[in-house]
Image (spheres, grey):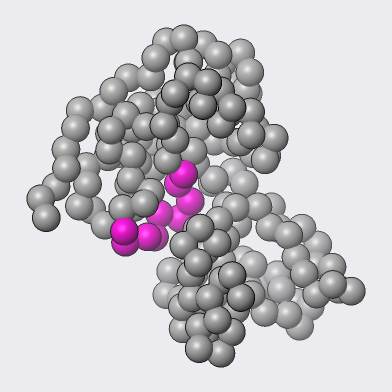
Amino acid sequence: MGAVSSEPRPLDPLIRRRLAEQFPPDFLSEDPAELAELGRDWTRVYTPAPSAVVFPRTTDEVSRLLALCSAERLAVVPSGGRTGLAGGAVAARGELVLSTARMRTIHPVDLLGATVRAQAGAVTEAVHAHAAEHGLTWPVDFASKGSSTVGGNIATNAGGVKVIRYGLTRQ
């Protein structure tokens, strides 16, 4: 399979202005180094060519961003730990990259329910450590746990080395 290549498409000026009006000043980046890094995953088969990258901190910001992108018919590619090997986090055709890098909050463990809430950008290994402090386990475990994220674990129904004992993420 040959590499797919396309030229980066600049972000529409109207969308750039709306993002500047509706979100914090550090929300949007068009830095070429960030676009190259955050526009790809580990496949390295596809050449990244995103229009821009955004860094939401809350689900409210994600919701408002996706409403704006839907209205403007701008495709969005999520970017977490980018440890996938299927091309799912590659923005190769001018898409907007939604980075979860600033969405790493892990809330207190609910001991009664034996549950924990974590934002999509929470690193798998950090969730392991947080749960272990309370005698609990986040059973999704694999070599990339130091950079993979909960959002990616859920989006891909990840399993890992404990999959036989605990099942896939949805279990």
Provide the major secondary structure of the magenta segment.
loop
Q: Position of residue 38 (x, y in %)?
A: 38, 43
Q: Which residues are magenta?
A: 78-86
Task: Name the foreground residue: 132 vs 61.
Answer: 61
Q: Is residue 16 above or below residue 138?
A: above
- Work out which quarter of the rendered image holds the C terminus and state it: bottom right
Task: Name the foreground residue: 167 vs 144.
Answer: 167
- Work out which quarter of the rendered image holds the N terminus and state it: bottom left
Indicate left or right for 4 with 115 as reference: left
Q: Is residue 52 above or below residue 91?
A: above
Can residue 26 be seen in the rendering of this structure? no
Q: Residue at x 22, y 42 (%)?
A: 47
Indicate left or right for 137 with 52 as reference: right
Residue at the farthest left position: 2
Indicate left or right for 2 with 139 as reference: left
Q: Residue at x 80, y 67 (%)?
A: 109
Residue 164 shown in magenta: no
Task: Name the foreground residue: 96 vs 146.
Answer: 96
Task: Name the foreground residue: 138 vs 73.
Answer: 73
Q: Position of residue 113 (x, y in %)?
A: 84, 72
Q: Position of residue 37 (x, y in %)?
A: 34, 43
Q: Quadrant of residue 55?
A: top right
How many numbered marks appear?
0
Q: Quadrant of residue 62?
A: top right
Q: Residue at x 48, y 70 (%)?
A: 158
Q: Position of residue 52 (x, y in %)?
A: 40, 28
Can residue 159 be seen in the rendering of this structure? yes
Q: Residue at x 89, y 74 (%)?
A: 112
